[in-house]
Image: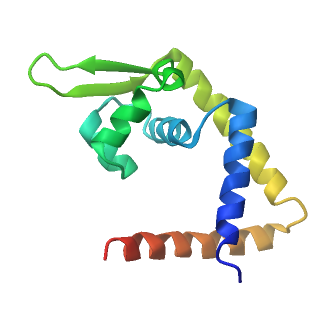
């Protein structure tokens, strides 16, 4: 198995998302996080933790012009924290992204049987969990 093939697949998916939705990887991750969590507002520090990135990285990502068009960032009146939530454009973009991801997935698995896809998903999820566990060491 050529382990670097995962990178090839990831690049192909990132290009397809960019072409179909005009989003980069960080924007995609932010939208998918809020989409999974009912667009619940989060402090930036908590969001950075959930996305497993540093606060400074998240701050840079949120300052991208395209990302700013999708979110509302509110400064706390009590401290220096900021809260992030998607605006209406961001919520609409989640729907577009999810639709595009379904299309990308269908293209990737074209010609595979349902059983093949199920086995792949099971093995892939195990690999992801193992990789996450190993990255903590």
Q: Is residue 32 or residue 116 the one in the foreground?
A: 32
135 sits left or right of 26 in the view: left
Q: Is residue 47 visible?
A: no
Position in image of residue 59 (x %, y %): 34, 33
Report the coloring of the rendering: rainbow
Image quarter (top left, top right, bottom left or bottom right) of the C terminus: bottom left
* Residue at left offset 28%, top offset 26%: 83
* Residue at left offset 62%, top offset 76%: 123
* Residue at left offset 52%, top offset 35%: 27
Q: Is residue 119 or residue 68 the one in the foreground?
A: 68
* Residue at left offset 17%, top offset 20%: 76
* Image height of 29 relative to 137, above or below: above
* Image height of 52 relative to 34, above or below: below
In the picture as drawn, the residue positioned furthest to the bottom comes out as: 1
Q: Is residue 83 visible?
A: yes
Position in image of residue 44 (x %, y %): 28, 34
Image quarter (top left, top right, bottom left or bottom right) of the N terminus: bottom right
In the picture as drawn, the residue positioned furthest to the left comes out as: 78
108 sits left or right of 85 in the view: right
Q: Quadrant of residue 20?
A: top right
Position in image of residue 106 (x %, y %): 81, 52
132 sits left or right of 21 in the view: left
């Amino acid at each position: 198995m050529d382990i670097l093939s995962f990178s090839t697949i990831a690049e192909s998916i990132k290009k397809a998302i960019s072409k179909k939705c005009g989003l980069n990887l960080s924007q995609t991750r932010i939208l998918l996080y809020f989409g999974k969590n009912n667009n619940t507002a989060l402090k930036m520090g908590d969001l950075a933790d959930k996305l497993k990135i540093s606060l400074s990285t998240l701050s840079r990502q949120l300052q991208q012009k395209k990302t700013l068009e999708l979110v509302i960032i509110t400064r706390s009146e009590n401290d220096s924290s900021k809260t992030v939530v998607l605006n209406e454009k961001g919520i609409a973009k989640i729907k577009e992204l999810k639709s595009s991801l379904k299309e990308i997935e269908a293209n990737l698995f074209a010609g595979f049987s349902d059983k093949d896809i199920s086995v792949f998903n099971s093995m892939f999820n195990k690999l992801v969990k193992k990789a996450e566990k190993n990255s903590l060491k």
